[in-house]
Structures are given as C-alpha cells and as structure tokens.
Amino acid sequence: MIKYALFLGCNIPARVSQYEDSSRAVLKNLGVELIEISGFNCCGYPMRNIDQKAYILSAAKNLALAEKQGLNILTLCKCCFGSLKKAEYLLKEDSNLRQDVNHTLADIGLKYEGNIAVKHFLSVLYHDVGIDAIKNRLSGSYKDLRIATHYGCHALRPSRITQFDNPIAPTIFDDLVEITGAISVDWSQKLECCGAPLTGINDDISINLTKKKVLDAKKSGADYLCTACPFCHLQFDTVQKEVASNDGDSEHLAPVLYSQLLGLCMGIDQETLGLMIDDCRLLIEKMGRSDSINHQSSINNPKPKKLLHGSKNAKK
Amino acid sequence: MVFNVLLYTSLFVFIVGLIYRISTWFSRKIGISSRNIGKSERLTAAFKGILEVIFSAKILILIKVFILDVVFQKRILKEDFLRWAMHMLIYTGFMLLLLMHALDNHITASLFSEYYSTLNPFLFLRDFFGMMVIAGLAIAIYRRFILKVPRLKTNSMDYYAIIILVVIMISGFFLEATKITSISDFERMVKEFSDVDEEKDLRALESLWVHEFGVVSPDIKEPFEQNLLEHGREIHETNCAYCHSSPKWAFAGYALTKILNPIALSLDRAKSPNILWYIHILACFFGLAYLPFSKMFHIIASPISLLANAVMEKESSHTANIATRQVMELDACTHCGTCSLGCSAATAFDALGNENILPSEKMVSLKSLIAGRKLSPEEMKAVQEGICLCTNCDRCTVVCPVGINLKELWLNVREDLIQKGYPEPLLLSPFSFVRGLNRYNIPADEYYKPVEAAKQAVAGKFDFLIKQSPLVLHGGGIEEFNQLSRDNTFSYCFSCQNCTSICPAVCSFDKPEEALGLLPHQIMRCLGLGLVEMASGASMIWDCLTCYQCQEHCPQNVNVTDLFFQLKNIAVKNVKKASSEKELSQRHET
C-alpha cells in the first residue's frame, strides 16, 4: 500500500472542502493510504512576498514533520506544492540556510535532512498509482464530455525545481482526464495563470486573466474547466461567479475538480464528492455506464496485485 | 460585623463591575460591523435575539451545548486531556467548595439538617474538593512553567488567576491545620459547648484530643495512660462527638498539622488562625470583587460565548448582535493558547518575532484596543501586521475551547484596522486572497484604498531617483545588493525581452511601462547596474503573478521571478525601516 502524509494547506479545509472529500474518496478507492499530521502549518507560500526567512521556516517545519514519520508528502494544492518544492530545493542547495533553519526547528524537536519527497495529487495518480491501476477502478466513462485542463503555474514552473511535467508541452493532466472517457480539448491558454495570485492585490489583472482563460476554453468547446488546486478552483468558481453577477457581461464556464471528475467515473456518489447538483448536471448527463458491469466487481474487490505494481513504481 | 462589611462591599463591587462589563458589550465599537449601530439598537437586538432562540427549537441546541461544552467542557477534552483534567479539577473543586463550604449557611445547612462543617462527610469533602483545586493548580503551574507548552504565553492576568487561587486554597488549608492544633480554640469550645468543669475531666478530654485529634497542648504531652484516654473518650462522646468527626478525615489539613506540630504552640499564641482567617476571606472577597475585571470574568463570558456561537450564524443573525457578540468574545477568551498552537501562520512568529501573529496574543491586544486604550504607533503596527498575517485557514475557530468565532472577528477587525491604519505591505501578498474573494461585500472605495496605500508605500521614489544626474551606481556598496548577488543570474541578462513579452501582467496593459514602472527585463538590467532601490521600487514586482513564465522562458536562465521575490522582501524591509525612522524623528521633534 502506498502511504503519504496528506498536506491540505489552509484554503482547502476552510473553503474547498469538497476537494479534500473527493480526493480522499478517490485515493481510498485506489488503495492509497493518507496519514494525518496535525502539526502541519501554512506551506509558506503567502509569506514569500514578505519575508524569505518566514517562508522557509514555515515550509521546512512541514517537511521536517513528514520526515520525522518517514512519509512523503502529498499536496492537493499546487501553490503548496510549488512552495514546498522550492523550499526543499533551497534547503538542499544551501547548507548554511539548512543549518539556520534546523537551529530554529530544534526548539520544537524537529530536524530536516531532505530525505522525503513532495508530490502533487496528480503526480501521485499518474506516476505512483499509474494509469492502468486507475482504469481498473472505473465503473463508467463520459461520452462527448469536453474538458479544458488547467495545469496551474506553481506545479509546472519553475520546471527545474518542481519536476512536475514537461513545462512546454505537459501531458499528465490530459492523460488523466482522458482515462475518464472525456476529451481533453486543445486550448491556447492552457498553461497560463488563473489570476488567483493577484486576487486582492490587483483584481483588474487577476480578473482579466480569468476572463481570458474562460473565454478561450469556451471557444475551444469545453464543457468544464478542470482544476486540481484550491486557488485556481476558487478563482474559476467564486471569483468568476462574483464577477459575472456584479459586472454582468462575462461568459461563464464552470470548473470541476479532477478528483470529482474521476470520482464520478468510479461510481462514488455525488454527496461524498461534494458535487452540487447545479455543478454536475452535465457531468451526469454525459456519464455512460454501458461497460460498467465488468469493472463494478473490481470496486468491491480491490486487486492488490495492481496496487503492488503501483507501489513499485513509487519506489523507483 | 467585619465579615459582613467586607462581604457586602465586595459583593457590591462585583455586581457593579458585572453590570459595567456587560454594558461594554453593547457600547464598545468593534471593526466595521458595528458602524452606525447605536447602543440601544444593540441592546434591543440582543433581547429580541435571545427571546427568539429561547422560544424556538434552538433551545434544544442550547441545552445540549450547555451540558456538553459548558459543564463537561468537551471542546477542551478534544484538544488536550491534561488541560481538561486541570480545568475540570479547578472548576468543579472550586464550585463545590463555593456551594458547600463558602455558602454553607445558605445551601448545605438547608439541604442537610445535620450539617456541621466539622462532621463527616462534610469534613472530608471540604478537604477533598480543596485538594481537587490544588491538583488542578499544580497541573496549571506544571504546564505553564515546567512543561512549557509551545506558544502558551503567560501574562499578568494569567499570573493573577493562579496566584489568587493559590492564596485562597493555601490559606484555607493552613487555617484548617492551625485550628486543629489550636489549644486556645480547644479551650474556648470546651468552655462554650460543654459542661465539663472538673480539673480531672478537663485533663482527660484534653489528653484524648492531643492523642487523637491533633491538638497541641503546652503542658499535656504523650504518652498517656490508657485509663486517662478511656475517661477522656467518655467525656468526648457525651460532649463533643455529636459535632466533631475525627480531624483525620480532613486529610490535607491533618497532614499539615504533622508538619506544623513543632511550631503549633507559637502559631497559636500569635493568633495564627485569626490571621489566616482574614487572609482567607480577604482573598476570597478580593477575588469576588475583582472578578469582573480579571481573567476570571471568563467564568461568565465563556459559557455565553459557547451558547451564542452555537445558535448564531453570519447570514441570519442581526449585524448588531454579531458586533455585540464579538465584543463579548474578547472577554470570553481565557488566553489558553489553543488557537496559537493550531495556527497555520504561527511559524511566522518564530521568524518575525511579532507576538501579535499568534491569535491568542492578538486577542490580548484587541482587548486593549477595543477598550479604547491608546496604543503607541509601534504597537499599532504590530497589531496590524499580526492581524493581516493570517491565512484564513479557520483552524483557530475550529479549536477554540470557548467557541469564539475568531475567523469572523479577524475579518471584521482587520478591515477596520487597514482602513484607518498604516500602509500594510502584507496586503500585497496572497494573504489578501480571502479579502479579494469578499471584495463585493466591501464598498468599492474602501476596498481599493488600503491596497493602494500599501502600493504607494512600497513604490520607489522614481522622481527623486531620476533627478540624480548622473545616476549613482552603488553596486556592491550596499547590503541589499550583496544579498541579491548570491543569486546573481541577473548578470547573464542580455535584454532579449523574452521575459517581458511573455509576462501575462505586462500583456494586461496597453501601456505597460506606464502602469508597471519598470518591465521585467528592465528590472534585471537595473540589478545588473546595482540600482537595487530602483528595481525594488517598481510596481511591476507587486503585479507579478509569480507564474514563472519569465523564468521558464529565459534563454539565459535568469531567475526572474525568484529575484522579484527578493526585491519584494527588500521593499517590505524598506517600508518598515522608513516608518520607524519617521517615528524616531517625530519623537525627537516632540
């Protein structure tokens, strides 16, 4: 069984709890065990603009906590992912910095040596669980559902540090979407920023980017924007809705979290996935269940063999 | 007489204090939510709200919360067993002592017709309850000063709460012990309550009491003849036993007599029982009178907070009631530190050293601020930074043992502080994200104002820089440049402008150079020339989405985005430095 320390960050429990619920359900179904570490705190991301030391310390504490339990970290948020990856890189590269940080961490009985990995939810699904293992768990698939994948900046770039996927032509998110039977559309704004980092700082730029992305995704015929990050999701969900209802004119395209998209194909009910009826009407409509009989059994009887294969991959 | 005067005075102060403190819940303004809502409106709204809850199904929620959270303190138990044990011991022990011992004439005596404080089970129970409080206090002291629970800060109010309880309890036990040993009390009681007057009988009784009841006599000492004790016991049975159980049942006080034994006679001669009695009741009365003004006020406010928060909702509750509740919540806070232990942003306190980052300490500062105390500019800035450095993860609210809705309190007070306060660079970070999500709940002009003020504060003084002719190139001469040089990838820049042409922020403007001050490639060139002040003053760095497109696409591997982060850090430091210098020069002038 593959085991991870689940890093939720600050936004998900407070504002995007459906992401947590659906990811837990999906990962459980795939035989991935998630461990809670109650001492986890902010990844440091919002501190980066203000004070480097505060950022690194905050990130390092999380890394040290996971390391203490010998667990790799699984993040659901791409900003947490990017922030932890960057800190991991800096702490590895700069021994003075590491010494400094460890000096402070020692006060709370922690130490970070750089012996664990930080992974994003999508990478875990793609690399550690594996496409085939996921396919074996599906009980249905979408027909004619067009999805625009939103990769998210802080997972993709800087690629030298995040090592998430090819930064120019990434594919893992598209592959993960296509196993659900959905079509991953080509759209020019795919790798652009959602605008969330400037929400509350420069809303004009932020909203402008969101609108640009939504417009482009709609033009490419997408039914949904698919996200795997709470910041991006809130930007396409709350911010987009608010802008639409207050400023009128803008086009609307609903976002769906990848964990929800996948969860429905696994036959997990909407309530568990935290899907509102309004959000998922189209998803349900486009869900075909013709070939479900074969796979249904696999949901009830997990196939440990497949999962072992997955964990071998993880060790590599 | 003295007792009654003291009692009624302290009771009077207590009641007046209570009325005053509760009235402040309605009169004090808090954050933006209480604007334009008068005292009387808040009072009526509260009455209406309370009545509506009482006469609805919500009363069931109140009953449930009262039993589980107020009486059994489930929320503390969920967080930390040791703390729960500590609080339960102190609170149940003290409450039982108050009811059974302090108010014995009114409560215990009317419930049990055969009540005497010196008879069992009352004699035993008094010591038992007292020892519960002592055990609780021992845990409290252990947690604060030996275990040193992380982020648990101890302020003067916490010291007061522990000291007043320790004085009451210790004086009580010493009073009990000196009374047990007191020969003068023994003689007085024999004279008052018995009909023993023959020298031989008196001697026999005293011998028995010295032998078995802990009395220390100046001339009658062990060992005693068996006959004498037998005789003493007969007299005891007929004269004393009906209202005296063996003091051994008062196990704590009796144990103390063993220690005090060698000095018991001198203590008695010095009228120690009298003195201790005064200390004991004065401490009790002082505690009572000062209760509304001390941390102990949480005895009243915390249950109200738990009950109010169980039935109030942001959407449906009257704004006036939310303001009232938030002022009350400041009194309900027990400064227990649970929020700070769970706080997501608390690690920033370790790096920046501002205590106000910790929610429990923010509450202390807010208490002063809302009460109208004038804070110094430094204190104000610290409070403002503390309240803005929050990721809005809501964990504080989830864990608060007294149910304070901290997340709403922060939002409300934060908005007010940044409207009136100093330019706050934290607003130019993702800490602003949640404020951005709420933007349509804030009037448009108020929404932009604090962010604009912060942007102005971090902006470089370009006019001034341009007037320097020729431009002074500091380069390695300044500290910031040396720091930046550790990531000196900027020196590889050959101005191909890839970074600028791919930047989504730049692409958002028709005339980006006007809107952003300097463009990404220009900033890199500035750094190459050592113009750190100019680079860190460009508004471009604050409009950076941190999407890393520039860095990813730089043919020269310049860490553009990462350098922006460093420049932002420098700009923030400069704002802090400039404002403290301003403060200093103003102080010199005055």
Image (tube, helix red, strand yellow):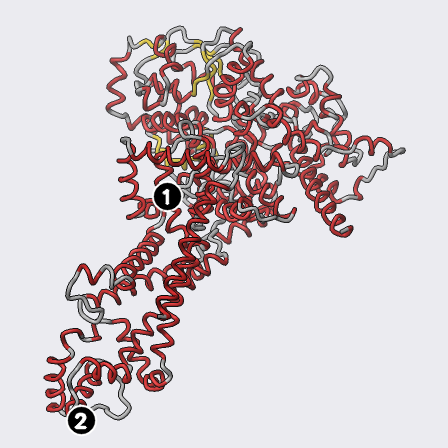
| Of residues B309 and B139, the one drawn nearer to the viewer in this rendering | B309
Instruction: Reply above or below: B211 against A315.
Output: below
- Residue drawn at the location 17% of the way across and 68% of the way down: B120
Q: Mark 2, chain letter?
A: B
Instruction: Reply above or below: A77 against B158.
Output: above
Answer left or right for B552 relative to A60: right
Quadrant into which the N terminus of chain A falls: top left
| Of residues B408 and A62, the one drawn nearer to the viewer in this rendering | B408
Nearer the N terminus, badge 2 or badge 1? 2
Answer left or right for B227 relative to B496: left
- Residue A258 in the image, given as x and y percentages of width and height: 42, 20
- Residue B402 in the image, given as x and y percentages of width and height: 38, 45
Helix, strand or loop at disc 2? helix
Discs 2 and 1 share one subunit: yes
- Residue B410 in the image, given as x and y percentages of width and height: 50, 37
- Cα–Cα gap, marks 2 and 1: 62 Å
Amino acid of disc 1 = Ile
Q: Which residue is mark 1?
A: B304
Amino acid of disc 2 = Glu
Answer left or right for B251 relative to A238: left
Q: Can residue B497 be seen in this snapshot?
A: yes
Numbered badge on residue B199: 2
- Residue drawn at the location 75% of the way across and 21% of the way down: B514
- Residue drawn at the location 74% of the way across and 51% of the way down: B587
